[in-house]
Image (cartoon, helix red, strand yellow):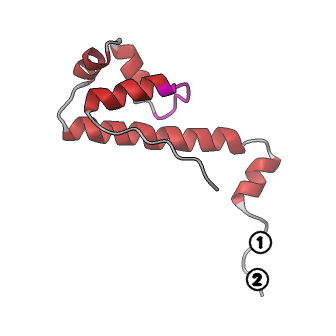
Amino acid sequence: MNKHIGGKLDDLLAEDGLQEEVTAAAINRVIAWQLTEAMNTKSVTRTEMAARMHTSRMVVNRLLDANDTSVTLATLSRASVALGIQLRLELGD
């Protein structure tokens, strides 16, 4: 007897038209967490991060907000330079 009922979660999300939204939210949560960890490791405050990025603290707050999916690659690039870490983007299946 098969104890698993239904299909894959990805299939369900795709059927409901939610896969892109859920994927974007998950990616953003990981990015926010990784940046927060790097800032903590290097003892960089949000104010200092904003100064290093030549931007406002509000931009840094949005960058570190796990629920804000409007982060751009340019902002991520400036953040990685500000922290002295490498930015890697990978696409695959």
Tell me the crowding category of disc 2: few under 14, some 14 to 19, or many 20 or more residues within 10 angstroms, Cα based: few
Extent of the magenta region: 66-73
Residue 68, given in percent of the width and then of the height, sits at: 52, 28
Quick check: 55 left or right of 12?
left
Q: Does 70 appear in magenta?
A: yes
Residue 86, given in percent of the width and then of the height, sits at: 34, 39
User: Which residue is pictured at 30% across the width and 38% down the height?
Assistant: 85
Query: What mark, if any, has residue 38 been given in the picture?
Result: none
Residue 9, given in percent of the width and then of the height, sits at: 70, 58
Residue 60, given in percent of the width and then of the height, sits at: 37, 22
Indicate the quadrant where residue 80 lies.
top left
Q: Secondary structure at mark 2?
A: loop
- Could you tell me the amino acid type at mark 2? Asn
Residue to which mark 1 is pinned: 5
Residue in front for this viewpoint, 24 or 65: 24
User: Which residue is pictured at 55% across the width and 30% down the height?
Assistant: 69
Quick check: 81 left or right of 69?
left
Q: Secondary structure at mark 1?
A: loop
**Contact, mark 1 vs mark 2 (Cβ under 8 Å):** yes
Residue to which mark 2 is pinned: 2
Question: How many numbered tags mark residues here?
Answer: 2
Quick check: 88 left or right of 69?
left
